[in-house]
Image: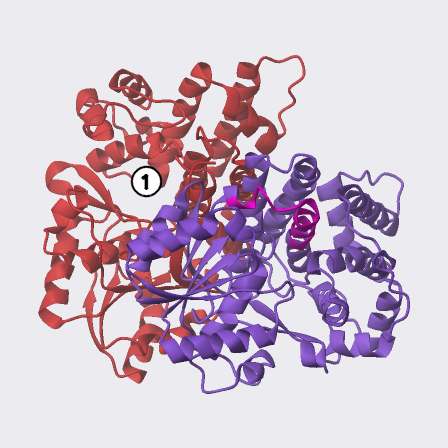
Chain colours: A purple, B red
Amino acid sequence: MENFIWYNPTKMYFGKGELNKLHDELKNYQKVLLVYGGGSIKSSGLYNQIIEILKTENKFYLELYGVEPNPKLKKVREGIKLVTKNNIDLLLAVGGGSTIDTAKAIAVGAISKHDILDLLLNKYQPEKGLAIGTILTLSATGSEMNPRCVISDSDNDLKLGLGNWNTDATFPNFSICDPSYTITVPKNQTINGIVDIISHVLEQYFHRNENSILGDKISESLIKIMIETGPRLIKDLDNYSLRETMMICGAMAWNGMIRGLSNNGDWSCHAMEHALSAVYDIPHGEGLAIITPIWMEYCARIDPSKFVNFATNIFNVNTENKTELEVALEGIENYKNFLYELGAPTSMKHYQIDTYDIDQLVEKAILGRETIGKYISLRSEDVKTILNKVF
Amino acid sequence: MENFIWYNPTKMYFGKGELNKLHDELKNYQKVLLVYGGGSIKSSGLYNQIIEILKTENKFYLELYGVEPNPKLKKVREGIKLVTKNNIDLLLAVGGGSTIDTAKAIAVGAISKHDILDLLLNKYQPEKGLAIGTILTLSATGSEMNPRCVISDSDNDLKLGLGNWNTDATFPNFSICDPSYTITVPKNQTINGIVDIISHVLEQYFHRNENSILGDKISESLIKIMIETGPRLIKDLDNYSLRETMMICGAMAWNGMIRGLSNNGDWSCHAMEHALSAVYDIPHGEGLAIITPIWMEYCARIDPSKFVNFATNIFNVNTENKTELEVALEGIENYKNFLYELGAPTSMKHYQIDTYDIDQLVEKAILGRETIGKYISLRSEDVKTILNKVF
């Protein structure tokens, strides 16, 4: 096991009706910026409930709405202005990962002496941030319980990330996770969330550490549970119990725990997907569904060992009279079948995209690094081969 | 799943050489009370290393030593006096659960307007505590990453606990967990630690919640890993990798995670063991090894259902042509065999104790409650039957 720091100061309120805990949490703050996306929290009634609580607790509040999927730097800048002008002391994000990520970027951008773009380019590390609260309405990114945020700089077609796991600058101070709010999430977004959750675990599962037995077992449990319950949820979208499972798995998948137990995960699928969604603005989960099996097949041929664990421990692939590679490929085939049955896209053809600038995509995936990926180090030629196969 | 709050603000530094992080952590404090047990940290050289760091960082420090297993209220009171008289702002516990628990009780007792005994009797809840740092030298209780502490009131032969999971009053602010420091832990204490870790998971595994699939899978992983690696460690005490596994499992077993995912665990074995060790001052892990299989057999006959999961998922017990109870009892037999092979005691006869006051023990286990235990509610008659079997 490699040395690691494990730190997660977010207080999570999980379960039906936990919104009432907002009353207590608000006592620590005076001025709130409510951050949200479109009208779904209005039609569901959640918006009114939150406003009611803000009024009951006599809080000054402003609103920043219109956060889009693949959230944009422009919206972050808009938020920073509002916050500094009005001395906001709590960012209250209501939504999924995009909304929460926007709030995080505002939380550090508003009090840093550096420009938010320089923080996103990792020229400087944010050490402090304003307080962040989240009310989760979409299970996917785990942003409700981690310090990471991903923001799209549309001017340069780049997806950029920030967030330090060892300081509390961008961890939400509290997150209210009521699975009821996710019941109305449409089918395609639910599929994308399932893929995103599994992908977070896969990125951490494919590592090169010694003695990561506990991390691996927890990873395998998370993947198996999502593979077993995901397709049932897609056929039964308003099943509370399955929404509950998805919500807790989403938080656990990427809250620092597996990251600590089996650190140095691969993360090259995320790097390549960020290039795709930066250029084509496709949903992150769909990009991951397209790229992951291709990455798997490419890497299994270089070193099938961990893919054998994946095949046997997740899909119970029988190993008798098979080579390691055959077992590995059978596991990957199982994962592809799972994605297909779930209804996830399998190629960029899904978007009628057939012309593309491969060198631009490779550059955006690599972002100046010599290689990406920890399980298999991919050079730009490898990334090119993989990305050529997604179209 | 029942509603739960999941909160764990402890920053854990895990791995070889992480003691150097003490330099940074000390920057937040001025006056330190070093809390430890006997001479083991002196003979290992750890004491000198810590003193060196305290001096380098120019900290005022005092020492409170002689903390015993089943730590005593008297020592806590001694610490409270030192802290209040000298304006200590960091309790630095170096040791295992007993030392850390003593530091926690001092941390709240020193700044509460209530007497520490009243806090331990849960007459009042501590809302605030002084900062606590830990340097772990024994894997067992998980106290390095949770808010709980257990203190013995020898005047009344009682073991009392405090610690609120939803405030940061008694969570360590930081914990340095370097498995190297546990290499010299003797065989019997290592056995007790293994039993304690598994017991913490078992207490949480036997619950009555719906949809606890993730919590159960993580619990089963933890138990299986400890059952597989524990006996290997006992035969190879200075194996770093196995010490590492034990240390991380010890923290994960009782840090709030499983508690949240499958809340309302049983905890009646701990209640009964606390009665035994309060009266006879036996090691907690040994008491748990004695009482748990007896509790299991008693409860499996009332409702074998969860014991069937235990038998099949942990020990791969074959269910063919067997009743639920037969499967359950076979699982329990496997657990008894594991404890026996590990070298844990199986009866209070181990201590040559054969006369006992059963009513006194039952009273101390029940502590005024009508029943104990969530998987099976035990009334005092049940507790009496179980406790009679330990002698």
Residue at image point 27% right, 19% down: B384
Q: Quadrant of residue A306?
A: bottom right
Residue at image point 16% right, 47% down: B119
A323 to the left or right of B49:
right
Compared with A288, A249 (above or below) is above
In this rendered view, identify the residue nearer to me: A71 or B141.
Answer: A71
x%, y% of residue A351?
83, 59
Compared with A382, B375 (above or below) is above
In this rendered view, identify the residue nearer to me: A72 or A111.
Answer: A72
x%, y% of residue A238?
60, 36
| Amino acid type, label 1 | His
x%, y% of residue B298?
40, 18
x%, y% of residue B151?
22, 46
Query: Can the viewer see residue B167?
Result: no
Determine the secondary structure under disc 1: helix
Quarter the N terminus of chain A occupies: bottom right
In this rendered view, identify the residue nearer to me: A332 or B238.
Answer: A332
Query: Can the viewer see residue A337?
Result: yes
In this rendered view, identify the residue nearer to me: A8 or B95.
Answer: A8
Mark 1 — residue? B284
Asked if residue B317 is among those painted magenta in the image, a careful observer would answer no
Q: Main secondary structure of the magenta part?
A: helix
Asked if residue A189 is among those painted magenta in the image, a careful observer would answer yes
Compared with A326, A134 (above or below) is below
Quarter the C terminus of chain A occupies: bottom right
What span is colored magenta in the figure? A181-196
Chain letter belonging to callout 1: B
